[in-house]
Amino acid sequence: MNYIILDLEWNQAISVARMIRKPVMLHGEIIQIGAVKTDENFNLQDKIRLSVRPMYYKKMNPHVERLTGITQEQLTCGLEFPKAFEMFKKWCGDDFRFITWGFDDVGVFSDNLTLHGLDPSFGSNYINLQLIYNRQTKSEHLQCALAAAAESMGIPIDVQCHDALNDAYLTYELCRSLDMTLGIAEYAEYAAALPVPLAKDAVNNIRDLKTMLYDKRVTDISCPKCGGKLKHGQWLFSSGKSCKTISNCPADGNFLIKLKAVKISDSSYTVMRTVFSASDEETAAFNEKIAQRKERRKKLAAQGNGGQNDKNSNV
């Protein structure tokens, strides 16, 4: 069996109004496929990079262009997605398993396959390397950036990130730095332990992330069981674009709410909202983090800076 270490780059709609909603909510249309093929011992076998010409999001989103360096001219020179997919599928072979950095790539791949009437389950048996990295490095950042993870492992970054092949190769270097035999052996166990969302939706046309927690379109969230309005606790930010809280329903108990903002244009974000059940242990652990944050603020205030340097400060 081979491992296919996959990375994708995708274009986004210029505005929410132009976002494709059928047959899928298309948050990203693939414009680049990059992959590294290894044998079962992670010896390098081959590499591939394919440029894809979008059918729907034909105008290059300025944010994506700055991130990837892919220009409007380059966007028009790629292969149509069905042709690129057939080439990639043949290159993968019959006996393989994907490895990705995070959950997003396989989800976007599935949506693009559905969009073109192709089998959306292709490569669905995959390994999210973030989970192995988090377990073996005891990282608290569940969605650590690829470059940050590479830096933490002492892997030099001497190429442009957000190029599909470069990022796939960087992911391969991370595989070589981790105990993949142990990681893969344990993967099914801790992947199965990940919480399953009870509800998931999106709020469009968010203009300012600094005030999104004051926007009722974002914070009015219904209990996924009874439909009643959830009462939120304090919000804890893991980055400027992601935060979470424990919310309560008098009838059905506690829920974990996660918000993640995705930039659509220079002046607009879509906020993805996900609701999970929250056990007593998870609620206690979250409250402990809130208490630790309060203690940090007190110490910083005592030092005379009023806690302004605390990156996890609440909105």
Image (cartoon, helix red, strand yellow):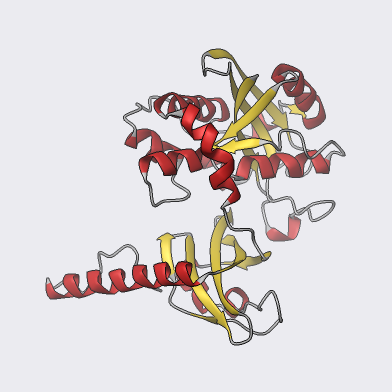
Residue placed furthest toward the right: 117
Q: Quadrant of the C terminus?
A: bottom left
Q: Position of residue 150 (x, y in %)?
A: 39, 33
Using the rendered image of the protein, determine whether residue 263 is visible from the camera's viewpoint: yes
Q: Position of residue 48 (x, y in %)?
A: 62, 19
- Give the answer, above or below, for where 275 lies relative to 125: below
Q: Quadrant of the N terminus?
A: top right
Q: Nearer the viewer, residue 189 or 263?
A: 189
Q: Nearer the viewer, residue 8 or 293?
A: 293
Q: Position of residue 19 (x, y in %)?
A: 74, 55
Left or right side of 261 for 155? left
- Give the answer, above or below, for where 31 lies relative to 107: above
Residue placed furthest toward the bottom: 250
Residue at point 65% right, 42% down?
11
Left or right side of 28 for 148? left
Residue at point 71% right, 26% down?
78
* Residue 5 falls in image quadrant: top right
- Give the answer, above or below, for where 267 lies relative to 223: above
Q: Position of residue 309 (x, y in %)?
A: 25, 64
Using the rendered image of the protein, determine whether residue 313 is visible from the camera's viewpoint: no
The number of numbered discs placed on residues in the rendered structure image is 0
Residue at point 68% right, 36% down?
125
Residue placed furthest toward the left: 303
